[in-house]
Amino acid sequence: MPLVRDIKIELNLDEVLRRQEVLKPERMQPRMMALIQELLGIVPELVEPAYIYEYYSIKEAADGHIVLETGDVFTSPDMVDVLTRAQEMTAVLCTIGHRLENTVQEFFASGESLRGILLDGIGSAAIDCVSNSACQRIGNEAAARGLTSSSPISPGMGRIPIEEQRRLFHLVPAEQIGARITSTSMIIPRKSVSMFIGIGKDMLRWHPVEVCEKCKLRDTCTHRRRA
């Protein structure tokens, strides 16, 4: 089961600002931009990026359900739509660890709420970077076998119940990267992402903007990507 830690975090300023809910960067005050740049400087010492993943053969894909070699059954429509044409499914768990969110809490506790808010947004951009790295690696491994990888789908996304998080934690040893699941199916550390990726011929892929368009929160989400 591959576990990857040598991940280079390269934060794109546009993505960082989107995670700060900044829709018009040109209107941002220079003081605020300077503070973001200052916080970006301490990110390398606050993140412990890692992801772990495993491939599972799909035993059956028919009649609105997917059955893995493990006997796990998935019935949510979005998972069935993506995985019906797949030969395998990859379960993936990514994190940046606890340090950054602990520092966010320390900022809030000391009355530095603005720093806390900004660093939290930077942490969201950092975990996006880790998950993108995982998707790229899995895509490259699929291509080396003459296959393709689907875009990732995650518990809580679209019509996939958040409870599917528990099934994913059954498929990967989350403790190896210091992650655990709560009683409400949320991941700790908070800056973590779980994903399912289909592997096969001509797998479904979509642009991130399309994901936002399908999301139930598309009309109110300030992190929404726009074309």
Image (spheres, rainbow, N blue to C red):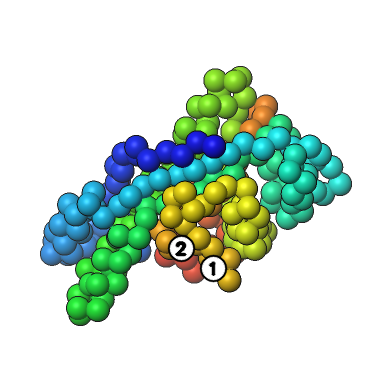
Question: Residue 220, position in %: x, y?
Answer: 49, 69
Q: Earlier in the sequence, mark 2 or mark 1?
A: 1
Residue placed farthest to the right in the image? 63
Residue 207 in sight: no
Reply above or below: 47 against 82.
below
Reading the image, the residue beneath label 1 is 182
Q: Residue at coordinates 59% horizontally, 20% vertically from top-left?
A: 145
Q: Secondary structure at mark 2?
A: strand
Reply above or below: 3 against 95.
above
Residue type at numbered disc 2: Ile
Q: Residue at coordinates 33% horizontally, 64% vertically from top-left?
A: 101
Residue 78 in sight: yes
Say left or right for 27 vs 128: left
**Callout 2 environment at 10 Å: few (<14), some (14 to 19), or many (20+)?**
some
Circles 2 and 1: CB distance less than 8 Å? yes
Reading the image, the residue beneath label 2 is 188
